[in-house]
Amino acid sequence: MCHSSEASGPLGPLGSAQWLDRGAHACSDRNSRDRDRLISDLGAERPRDSLSQWTARTASVLTAFPSWSAEVRCLDLTEEVGELARAVLVAEGRKCTDLEEPVAQALCGVLFDVFALAQQYQVDLDVQYGDQLAARRSSRAGQRRRA
């Protein structure tokens, strides 16, 4: 669940409900061509903010909530990952439940806590995530050469 109370849309600066709903419906559609087209359409609609900008926006939303320790935030992140797992299981038809949370909404809940932790620990996600992607890319390339 996205935790926001600020203006600029029902979900505040983290995104608009309409954009998330469109993404959620696309994710449940089994036709990958339609999903790919929608993803590219969504990319054209939304500005591409940096991870640091999303972290800063999340920090501004956090001012409306009680301050949580890193341990409590981490526990909340674990809960959000569980909600994401349930949403994926429902979307894939592996689990039936009355409480259907779209995958896109569950992903937002995870991102909220990730950005909150990044802000709390002063992590520059643009740099760190870029380094992580580069390391994974080179690790994968090394695996291909050995195979």
Image: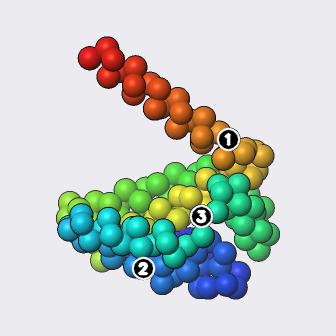
SS state under label 3: loop
Give 121 or 83, whichever is nearer the viewer: 121
Give 137 or 7, whichever is nearer the viewer: 137
Mark earlier in primary sequence (2, 1): 2
Give 46 or 13, whichever is nearer the viewer: 46
Circle 2 packing at 10 Å, graded few (<14), some (14-19), many (20+), is: some
Q: Position of residue 46 (x, y in %)?
A: 55, 73
Task: State the mark number for residue 43.
Answer: none
Q: Nearer the viewer, mark 1 or mark 3?
A: 3
Residue reaching furthest to the front? 44
- One can see residue 147 in this view: yes
Q: Nearer the viewer, mark 2 or mark 3?
A: 3
Q: Amino acid at mark 1?
A: Val
State left or right for residue 135 relative to residue 126.
left
Task: State the mark number for residue 48.
Answer: 3
Label 2 – label 1 distance at C-alpha? 30 Å
Q: Residue at x 35, y 21 (%)?
A: 143
Q: Residue at x 39, y 25 (%)?
A: 141
Q: Position of residue 142 (x, y in %)?
A: 40, 20
SS state under label 1: helix
**Residue contact at pointers 2 and 3, CB within 8 angstroms:** no
Q: Position of residue 81 (x, y in %)?
A: 46, 54
Circle 1 packing at 10 Å, graded few (<14), some (14-19), many (20+), is: few
Q: Position of residue 68 (x, y in %)?
A: 73, 57
Q: Amino acid at mark 3?
A: Arg
Q: How is the rendered protein coloured?
A: rainbow
Residue named by callout 2: 21
Image quadrant where one finds the C terminus: top left
- One can see residue 28 in this view: no
Residue named by callout 1: 127
